[in-house]
Image: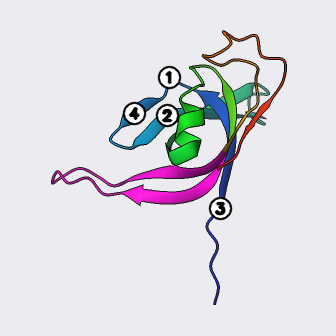
Amino acid sequence: MPSYNKTVIIGNMGADPSIKESSTYVSVATNESWMDKETNEWQEKVSWHKVMAYGYTAEKLNKLSKGTTILVEGTLDYFTPKEEGETPAAFIKAQKITNMSTKSKDDGGNSSGKDDIPY
């Protein structure tokens, strides 16, 4: 039976990308909101996602900065730490990143449009 592993998120970068070895890492925040039926008040939940990119995608990700809204397409993967007692962590291995805002390090936030960053 075939299997499929695809993850797509749109969110804001929580910090500037960091480079470790040959990969680039960034945390991306997504949020959801809903009306609580009991209190009639809006509730909000923020989720943080670890994103890892390499190669051309990492080079383009390094041009973006904290607060930039990005669309990440990739696969869900897991990292098992070498240190004993640490728990495995899920992360998104980015295959494509699209800049959904006009903010980037290169232009100081004055870009005229969206940037599609292919893998």
Nearest the viewer among 54 and 80 is: 54
Quarter of the figure with the N terminus: bottom right
Vertical arrangement, residue 3 with respect to residue 18, above or below: below
Q: Looking at numbered disc 2 in the image, what kind of residue is underneath it? A: Val
* Location of residue 105 by image quarter: top right
Q: Give the Cα distance between marks 4 and 1.
A: 10 Å
Distance in Å between CA atoms under marks 2 and 3: 19 Å
Q: Picture coordinates of residue 18 (x, y %)?
A: 42, 30
Q: Examine the residues drawn in magenta and state their main secondary structure.
A: strand
Q: Quadrant of residue 24?
A: top left
Magenta region includes residue 75: yes
| Amino acid type indicated by mark 1 | Asp
Q: Earlier in the sequence, mark 1 or mark 3?
A: 3
Q: Can residue 68 be seen in the rendering of this structure?
A: yes
Residue 38 appears at what percent x and percent y?
Answer: 74, 34
Residue occupying the point 64% across, 28% down: 12
- Name the mark on residue 16: 1
CB atoms of marks 2 and 1 within 8 Å: yes
- From the image, state whether disc 4 or disc 1 is nearer to you: 4
Tell me if residue 46 can be seen: no
Q: Which residues are magenta?
A: 72-96
Q: Which residue does the image show at 79% across and 27% down from the upper left? A: 40
Residue 105 higher or lower than 94, as above or below? above
Q: Amino acid at mark 3?
A: Lys
- Residue 37: horizontal and vertical position, in percent? 78, 36
Mark 2–mark 1 Cα distance, whole angstroms, equals 7 Å
- The disc, 2 or 3, on the residue closer to the chain's N-terminal end is 3
Q: Earlier in the sequence, mark 2 or mark 1?
A: 1
Q: Which mark is residue 26?
A: 2
Q: Secondary structure at mark 3?
A: loop
Q: Do the numbered discs 2 and 4 sit on residues whose CB atoms are within 8 Å? A: no
